[in-house]
Amino acid sequence: MTVRGVILDLDGTLVDSRGVHVRCLRAACQDVGLPPPSAARIATRSAATDLATLARLVGEPLAERAMAAYNAHFPLGLAEAPAPPRPGAAEAVAALAALGLALGVCTGRSRATAARLLTAAGLGIPLLVAREDVDEPKPAAEGLHRARGLLGLSAGEVVFAGDTAHDVRQGEAAGITTYLVGGAPGAGLASLAELPALLTAPAPAPAAGSGR
């Protein structure tokens, strides 16, 4: 089936948000009375959503308070630690749009923080499915199903690109062809900029004698 749309993960795929994310995680932990976590602790507690990461850092009873603190710190944190587009991301978005492909973003972030990141990075992708849009967050398939449904496309008509194992599991759960990009082990694409050419490459010719 012909690909008619592309759904993209946000953090690490479209936007380099590591700096602001770490800054806000540390501030949130302090706001609920805990010491700011080390880089190693943050790395080992990272989960598919900010709320899940905070639950691992501060414990479930404090997670919602910490999430509210994270969101409150985010605008200032973004001003202090800019989140530029990932290398090749802006070029990829422009090329995919020029091909006439429908585009959407599916993220485990809240809508407000996701929209801020897209705006700060200068990436104009109008369709955004965020954490509050689903009952089951990443790596559950619900977000991708919602995104492709809003695009008016079937699972076979879209592809998904992300940068973590959580994204791969989500894509597999949704039955959507998924590309792993960036520096993750096993990444098929070094940069999102490679995706447009991959999607427009001609299908390989049948082998001689195949009868096709």
Image: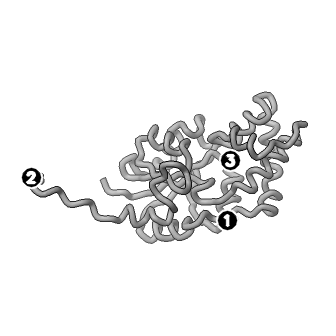
Query: Quadrant of residue 84 in the image?
Result: bottom right
Cα separation between marks 3 and 1: 19 Å
Cα separation between marks 1 and 2: 51 Å
Residue situated furthest right in the rendering: 33
Sequence-earlier tag: 1 or 2? 1
- The type of residue carrying mark 2 is Gly
* Tag 1 residue: 84
User: SS for tag 1?
Assistant: loop
Query: Quadrant of residue 118 in the image?
Result: bottom right
Asked if the residues shown at circle 3 and circle 1 are in contact, with their CB atoms under 8 angstroms apart, the answer is: no
Q: How many marks?
A: 3
Asked if the residues shown at circle 2 and circle 3 are in contact, with their CB atoms under 8 angstroms apart, the answer is: no
Cα separation between marks 2 and 3: 52 Å
Residue situated furthest top in the rendering: 61
* Tag 3 residue: 110
* Tag 2 residue: 211
Residue at the (80%, 63%) spot, across then down = 79
Q: Position of residue 85 (x, y in %)?
A: 63, 65
- The type of residue carrying mark 3 is Ser
